[in-house]
Image: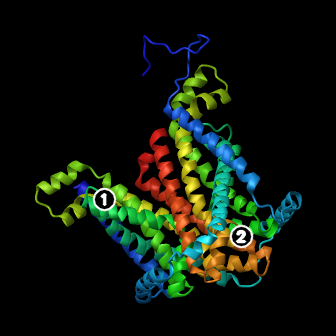
Amino acid sequence: MLADQTRLSRKWQHIFLLIIVCCFTWIAIEMVQFDFYQSLLSIPTAGLWMIENLWITAETWREFPDIMLKLVETILMSVAATTIAAFISFFLGIAGSTTTRRNGLMAGLSRGIASVARNIPVVAWALILLLSFGQNSLTGFLALFVGTVGFLTRAFMESIDEVGLKSFEALTATGATYFQVIFKAVIPQALPQMLSWVLFMIETNIRSATLVGILTGTGIGYTFDLYYKTLNYEAVALVTLLIILTVIVIELTSNRIRKVIL
Amino acid sequence: MMGVAYIKRSKTGRINIKIGNKVDYTLKAIIWFLGIVTVAAFLVFDYTGFHLTSALKETVANLQTMFLTPALTHFSWSEAFYQVGVTLALAVLSTVIGAVIAFFLALLSAENLSNQAVAKVIKTYVAFIRAVPTVLWVLIFAIAAGLGSTAAVLGMLFHSVAYLVKAFSESFEEVDKGVLEALRSTGAGWWQTVVHAVLPSTMTYLLSWTFLRFEINFSVAVAMGAAAGAGGIGFELFMASGFYFDLREVGFITYCILLVAIILEVASTQLKKRYFPSQQ
């Protein structure tokens, strides 16, 4: 009887959810004047256009060294932003985790910093920083860095929380100091998970770096934008292909690393 | 774990208390590698027009103007409200349509529900789509459909579908094998297994992934407004910072985005707490 009732209320919950989602979708369609028919139609058009225009010709390969240079710059930018952000997040994570926190003020502060950094989109950071840092690699680097600190702090806090209180309490009971406990019990257990998040963030940042590059005029994003605006679609295809290759290679590598460390 | 008879000693005869293994080496190697790449990155960066002290001073001053004296000059409160709505609408459309398409594709790409070959093909295809940054999809669609909401939704849709197919099919693959076999042995058809076994046990995961994607799509929609002319609050942000150089308006818009993003984050944590109490 009780099971029947919960099942019934579950069913109503789902129907209710469905109605809400439908309402929101309808409002959204009205708001942006989204045309289903036209967009369905434009998928084959776009496909045809891609097949017709996105051919990499021999001529385009002359641009290859330039594009590679920018791509390497972008990769380095993402890795550097992630690594340094991981270093900062490491301390913020320890200060903010429920297992390892020392006082509420520090914990609240690090959680607050993480939340603000994470929730202001990377685009906004890029545009804000562009105003004072100008058009160079550092602007892109900083924009990625801030967003990454926000994300990694949250991820690290969760990784540290997952380790649990047991080993923390065990070491505290032996008379180990706070930092001894952190470095001998908490970090060794949480490290594989944390590094897995760092790898994930490097992948994400290479994709975001393209976007940030378009806005701040740096790296591969700028190269793409330049070719796109000068209607050099062969080069656009080459840039896109190289980005795809980079992302896939990095994804496969980090999957293999994950298999070893986790 | 440790052998009793054999004790590992170092060259000087001291007992080795660290068990060197593949995992430790890999962890160390990754950390060293990342550190070296980071140093290298700073050596090759392009520092055109960059002066650290003046840039820092300017940033602090700019941030102060932005966040302490936010104001609207080029448009009204209701306009700002409307633009946030447009950005949310782009996110809603690409998430909802994306989730529906992804659901069916994920059924076809889950190895326990579908043909192995079909699953492989879809998974590879989806990995390929995911590797292209969303903004590139939007810009490529913009050539065919013109800049605007259609191109933006299509581009974001592509990426959402690719992301959700991966998440959904992994959830489907975790469904208990025994349950599927039990249903099949009663003579249930493919659709019946999906509706009565797969859906009930994965529904909460699907919803949770979809909401997470909605959160991501909101910030993507802001980005598309700024970088691909998709409209909404992102476009206003781009105009305020890139054309009017109006820091106070940039501050106001940033606050708007921050507010919505935090509301979405709180909502998703609440949903998680409600549907996955064991994980908390």
Spot occupied by residue B245 in the image (x, y as percentages of width and height)? 80, 77
Depth order, front residue of A64/A227 = A64
Q: Which residue is mark 2?
A: A216
Quadrant of the drawing holding the N terminus of chain B? top left
The tag on residue B249 is: none
Q: In this image, B21 relative to A8: left or right?
A: right
Q: Residue furthest front?
A: A58
Eye-nearest disc, 1 or 2: 2
Element class at badge 1: loop
Element class at badge 2: helix
Depth order, front residue of B6/B80 = B6
Query: Which residue is depicted at the point 31% across and 54% down?
Result: B173
Q: Which residue is mark 1?
A: B110
Q: Label 2 crowding class (10 Å Cα cut-off): few <14, some 14-19, many 20+?
A: many
Q: What subunit carries mark 1? A: B
Q: In this image, B76 relative to B121: left or right?
A: right
When asked about the image quadrant of residue B170, the answer is bottom left
Q: How many marks?
A: 2
Q: Amino acid at mark 2?
A: Thr
Spot occupied by residue A189 in the image (x, y as percentages of width and height)? 53, 34
Query: Which residue is depicted at the point 55% across and 74% down?
Result: A58
Whether residue A154 is visible to the viewer of this picture, yes or no, is: yes
Q: Label 1 crowding class (10 Å Cα cut-off): few <14, some 14-19, many 20+?
A: many
Type of colouring: rainbow
Q: What subunit carries mark 2? A: A
Q: Amino acid at mark 1?
A: Ala
